[in-house]
Image (cartoon, rainbow, N blue to C red):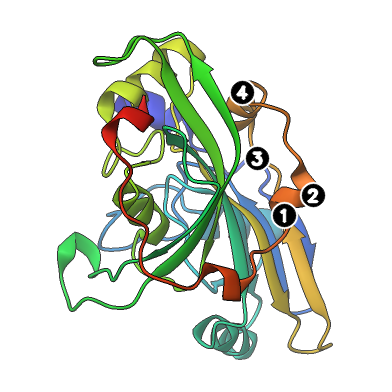
């Protein structure tokens, strides 16, 4: 996508950010793709960020509790004051929060797998730290596109549950599985990304923060927030085999997913 096209795809402050759920001191929103949460050393200065859009929309300063990449869409939790931000952040740090992401990947991914593969920080800097992600294939599709040595191309819709929160964890773990995300310009495959742009007019990273479970610190009540995906994501989901969404949302049994990191699949399974 050309730079001017990327800018055109970013929501303007006139477009409303969808509020999915809220309490007196927190709220959860549906972050659009291609919109940074805030300015950082990695994104550089931007005219628009999610926090700036929300400040214009709601008239209040909000505190982002966790990260979503600029290219990723979906549930983002925010606090309305620093004290609530600290309480919610503690839930993330103590791994009380559960997150589920939807992604479209190259090849037929395994039905269920645990990727237990340590990761360094951004740009490979810093020490290796433990990182675990459970991945489940919930649907698949085969297109009559000749890519490389294969006459067709296969893709999977997966749910990923990150147990830790490392930099680009899901994207890097799916690459480790040899099933990189479609639209991932850092860890994916250019020929597949181009096919989705040309054949389906899908120009985004196909990673969506689908579900978020946490506890409201004030009421003590569990909260389950679900974010709908955008039209580009819907375009590929409609091509997939019938999806049992209830089964897809069922969290994996931790006892059944212990073990070593899954080995990368052999190349013939990836077309």
Left or right position of 257 against 168 = right
**Residue at (69, 76) in percent of width and height:** 214
Q: Measuring 33% from the left and 20% from the top, which residue is drawn there?
A: 194
- Pointer 3 and pointer 1: residues touching (CB < 8 Å)? no
Q: CA distance from mark 3 to mark 4?
A: 10 Å
Whether residue 116 is situated above or below residue 183 in the rendered picture? below
User: Residue 3 placed where, x, y %?
Assistant: 31, 28
Q: Which mark is on residue 246? A: 2
Q: Single out the mark in the foreground, 2 or 4.
A: 2
Q: Quadrant of residue 218?
A: bottom right
Kind of element beneath mark 3: loop
Location of mark 1 (residue): 249
Quadrant containing the C terminus in the rendered view: top left
| Residue beneath disc 4 | 235
Question: How far apart, in angstroms, are the residues tagged by discs 2 and 4?
Answer: 20 Å
Residue 112 horizontal/vertical position (percent): 54, 53
Pointers 2 and 1 in contact (C-beta within 8 Å): yes
Q: Earlier in the sequence, mark 2 or mark 4?
A: 4
Residue that label 3 marks:
229
């Amino acid at each position: 996508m050309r730079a001017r096209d990327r800018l055109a795809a970013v929501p303007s402050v006139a477009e409303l950010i969808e509020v999915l759920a809220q309490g007196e001191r927190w709220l959860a929103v549906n972050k659009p793709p291609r919109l940074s949460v805030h300015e950082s050393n990695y994104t550089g200065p931007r005219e628009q960020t999610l926090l700036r859009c929300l400040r214009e929309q709601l008239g209040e300063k909000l505190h982002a509790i966790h990260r979503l990449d600029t290219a990723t869409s979906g549930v983002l939790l925010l606090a309305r004051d620093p004290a609530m931000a600290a309480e919610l952040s503690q839930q993330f740090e103590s791994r009380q929060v559960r997150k589920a992401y939807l992604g479209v990947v190259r090849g037929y991914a395994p039905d269920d797998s645990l990727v237990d593969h340590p990761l360094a920080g951004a740009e490979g800097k810093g020490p290796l730290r433990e990182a675990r992600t459970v991945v489940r294939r919930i649907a698949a599709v085969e297109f009559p596109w000749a890519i490389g040595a294969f006459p067709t191309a296969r893709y999977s819709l997966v749910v990923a549950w990150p147990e830790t929160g490392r930099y680009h964890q899901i994207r890097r773990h799916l690459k480790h599985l040899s099933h990189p995300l479609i639209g991932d310009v850092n860890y994916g495959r250019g020929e597949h990304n181009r096919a989705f742009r040309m054949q389906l007019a899908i120009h985004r990273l196909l990673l969506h923060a689908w579900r978020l479970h946490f506890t409201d610190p004030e009421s003590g009540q569990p909260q389950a927030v679900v974010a709908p995906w955008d039209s580009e994501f819907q375009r590929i989901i409609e091509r997939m085999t019938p999806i049992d969404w209830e089964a897809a949302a069922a969290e994996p049994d931790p006892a059944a997913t212990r073990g070593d990191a899954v080995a990368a699949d052999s190349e013939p399974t990836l077309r």
